[in-house]
Image: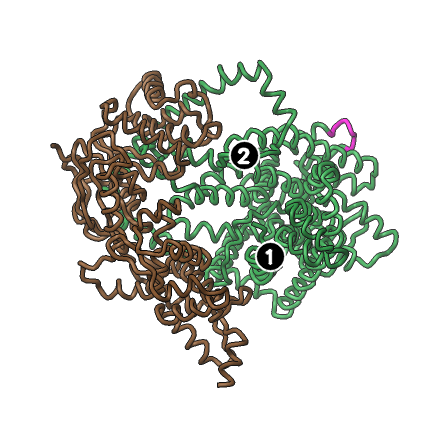
Amino acid sequence: MQPKFSEQILVKRKVGFQDFIVITIVLAVLYLIVDLGEGMVVPFSPEHKIAISLSPWELPYYAARSLLRMFIAYFLALLFSLVYGYVAAKNRVAEQILVPILDILQSIPVLCFLSATIVVFIAAFPGRLLGVECAAIFAIFTGQAWNITFSFYNSMKTIPKDLSEAASVLRLNWWQRFLKLELPFSMIGLVWNSMMSFGGAWFFLAASEAISVLNENILLPGVGSYLSTAIDSGNMPAIVYSIITMVIMIVGVDQFLWRPLVVWSQRFKIEMSEASNQPTSWVYDLLISSKLIDWLTNFVFEPFLKFLNNFVNKFANVTENSISSLKRSQHSARVDKYLKYFVLTIFAIVFVKALYMDVMFAISLGLNQLLSVALLGFYTFLRVLAAVLLGALWTIPVGVWIGTNPKAAKFMQPIVQVAASFPANMLFPFVTLLFIRFGANFDIGCIALMMMGTQWYILFNVIAGAMAIPNDLHEAGAVFKLRGWNRWKKLILPSIFPFLITGAITASGGAWNASIVSELVNWHDKTLQATGIGAYIADVTNKGEWNGIVWGTTVMCVFVVITNRMLWRKLYSLAESKYRLD
Amino acid sequence: MKTLIEIKDVCKEFSMPGGGKSNVLEAINLSINSGDFLAILGPSGSGKSTLLRIISGLVEASKGSVSYLGDRVIGVNPGVAMVFQSFALFPWLTVLENVVLGLEGKKMAKDAKEDKARQVIDMVGLDGYEGAYPKELSGGMRQRVGIARALVSDPDVLLMDEPFSALDVLTAENLRRDLLKLWLDGKIPTKAIILVTHGIEEAVYMADRAVILSANPARVLEDIYIDIPRWREKKSPEFIALVDRIYALMTKRDTNVEESTSIKAKKIFELPQVTAGALTGFLELLADVNVKTDLYKLAERFMMDIEDFFPIVHAAEILKFAFVAEGDIELTDAGIKFAQASLLERKIIFGEQLLKYVPFVWRILTILESKSNHRIDADFFKSIIARVLGDQEANRQMDVLVAWGRYSELFEYDKDEECLFLPKESVNNEAKE
């Protein structure tokens, strides 16, 4: 689900005019997408539909396709993050527009836009699989990009003043500054958030490879669609194969890519003292001691990078000169101002029109349906809250137990991490089967589906929180004979509170996303549907009812943004001001 | 003597939220000539670092101009290099890479750059550490890298922003000597050095010229030439006499200049960041000394840095526990009474002085008493202060007020609700009256 919320995002901001504007913008964009999509009458051409083979021997190929999708999306997300974050951090006018947009983008459920984007991409590549492929990559991209972008932007904004001054006095041009200061300083955050986002993106992979849009079932070769085919045919062994493949992929990418990168990124620590427990990675050690890698670095990578660096450096020198001469002319302030007005005017014209159309579109549903969909949003809101609360209920004691037992923590933390990365939607069929067999009430039962993906984030954070309780507080507690409930009330709960809230925020974001895939599930030829906005969106997407998609998405976004502002941010600032242990 | 840098009528204002403006520097005129070793001295917060940043071109002056060799400086000053208090080394680069960075802007072959960097590294005594990362070095060695990085580009003027204050006493002393030796022996092509410092001894030991700034806003109080022959002996009478004189200059309230109303308004609020505990300790020690004492010697006896020492002296002065004139400090009657009182009596005396001499405390109390529930949001008072001093300073002032109010038990503070309230006792007393 949604990866770890970058902490700094939760700046103290009240619900304000800005939020209103940004929501407006998002809705307007939604309309533009729909508008583009609607003009496209050619649905996905059936002759290009590919059949997914359930033979386990095909799985490596599908896994490779899935991985390729993940990495293309990650590469794009990284590129996007660097450019977007850089511009937002460097240009004050851009910052005022870009940061609020990002703030909303990262809190709205990505999956409600999936169907709309798929239609757009299919339109862009009519009759070819490439369109669907792009749409899937785009969905994964949206699951990764915002966090990485925020991390990079925050790093750029928190570069220590003395280092930035030193770079100025040393007269580094913008490229040298980026290469020697900004990128290295951001590296730890970039690597860490990349790892978390990549972990979260498996969910979107599984959700986007097989989707039905406009009465068409679209399948892309990949592990996600393998699973969905297996579910449709009720083939249990194939389901298990695909799950095993998924676990191998998650663990493999973690061990072979992210762990070594995390270890490598430690060299960019700004603290001048050596930390006592450094992360380790056997793959990293292997690579470091490898002669081949040594040779590759010396004779392939470095010459190439040097060439690239020289080239960009020359370019940077030229632009730097022209920028400084522009500054000298002293008109830059005025140019900035005009630019700002120009951009804002364009924004205003496009979005006012789009918003108007958006509203007209939704109104076509009629007042009754508008209200009933809003009510559906409320049901899902209750379900999300319940999923978070129930998740917290069991993860707090378990997490505290793990966190206060170093041995257990060392053993359990990686497992929890894999569990958090594992796309819970792949496990839905098993639970669905149980529900069908025992005829459970799905309106309540789907809370369990939501929890399956989200509870790990709470557990993860509670463990971290319990591990962070300083030993002297434990000792003080023991000396003053704090026991039982008193110990929880006075010592443990306050200590883990900030972590718990961070986990709950992430979990709630994930649960909203999950509602779209968990309120409407299939097994073989049976369908379970809960009363909620997630099921509604999934349903209208299936049927291709555009006004329903627009209004459903709007309702969900409004609910999510309001919960974030009214509930989570308040709790977060309380946690920050009162319960921070340092 | 060639003028390298000319500073003309430089002013610096920072705008504050709410539209107000805070004056940091006012009408600064200085010229730095070839051969100058200039120290800029001033109390903390006097804007001496800001002045240095204006000289370097990192910060733009609100008014006035800085010129280098006759050309007005726009952007970073081309003739300077800078040494930072925090060293400002790039932790992910080795010593050599850090120093080469000083040549990054120059058109030189890569090998030539490295050779030059190695030479300078040798010169500052870091031979053999070229491949080390900053985190492997001690503080003194890190600052040597900082100095090497600044010197490698052969700057005309070397700017140093409190370069020794992050180091321990012995390391700092060692580094001062080494730097001075490079300078006096003419080993470096640098033509002038500007050293910002709060150490009066450091300035008198190293520099040929000391510029003393006043605080709030900073003006040049005095521009003193130091002609004590090298190497200077810290125990020599002329050295001590000069240090003493500068101390007196720095503690003297700025009386010559007509104070504008805005400055007066500022002084109503500005309390130094001192805890009641530190003030108590200071007054006790002062009472032990008993007589009128030389401030400079007192600071030395307490082994305190003037950055920490001056605020305490200032606090004692504001509350009229002590009286400062011509570099000497003397306890007032209230001060003597306070030093000898018991713990509880002290709180009462402290409260009395606070009410008498800090008008804003009196105002807080009256407002609290006028409210029926005797509670008011701290933000209310904060916004009053912020109008004059800006948000950031208002937060600090509020912290001091709360700490002093709590100590004297004049008023209390509820952190959860962020409001000030009267303690129950005083409410009851009032009711009886």
**Chain bearing mark 1:** A
A297 above or below B92?
Answer: above
- The colour chain A appears in is green
B217 above or below B427?
Answer: above
Residue, x 80% and y 49% (percent of image)?
A432
**Could you say which quadrant of the image residue A165 lies in?**
top left
**Spot occupied by residue A105 in the image (x, y as percentages of width and height):** 54, 51
Q: Of marks 1 and 2, which one's residue comes earlier in the chain?
A: 2
Does dot 2 land on a helix, a strand or a loop? Answer: helix
A576 above or below A323?
Answer: below
- Assign the N terminus of chain B to one quadrant of the image: top left
Q: Is residue A172 left or right of residue B374?
A: left
Task: Please state which of residues A335 and A232 is positioned toward the viewer in this rendering.
Answer: A335
| Residue that numbered label 1 is attached to | A553
**Spot occupied by residue A268 in the image (x, y as percentages of width and height):** 50, 32
Task: Please state which of residues B373 and B250 is positioned toward the viewer in this rendering.
Answer: B250
Three-letter code for the amino acid on which mark 1 is drawn: Thr
**Chain bearing mark 2:** A
Residue, x 29% and y 50% (percent of image)?
B294
Magenta part, dominant SS: helix
**Spot occupied by residue A206 in the image (x, y as percentages of width and height):** 68, 41
Say if the magenta span includes residue A56: yes
| Residue that numbered label 2 is attached to | A75
- The colour chain B appears in is brown
Three-letter code for the amino acid on which mark 2 is drawn: Phe
Q: Residue furthest right?
A: A438
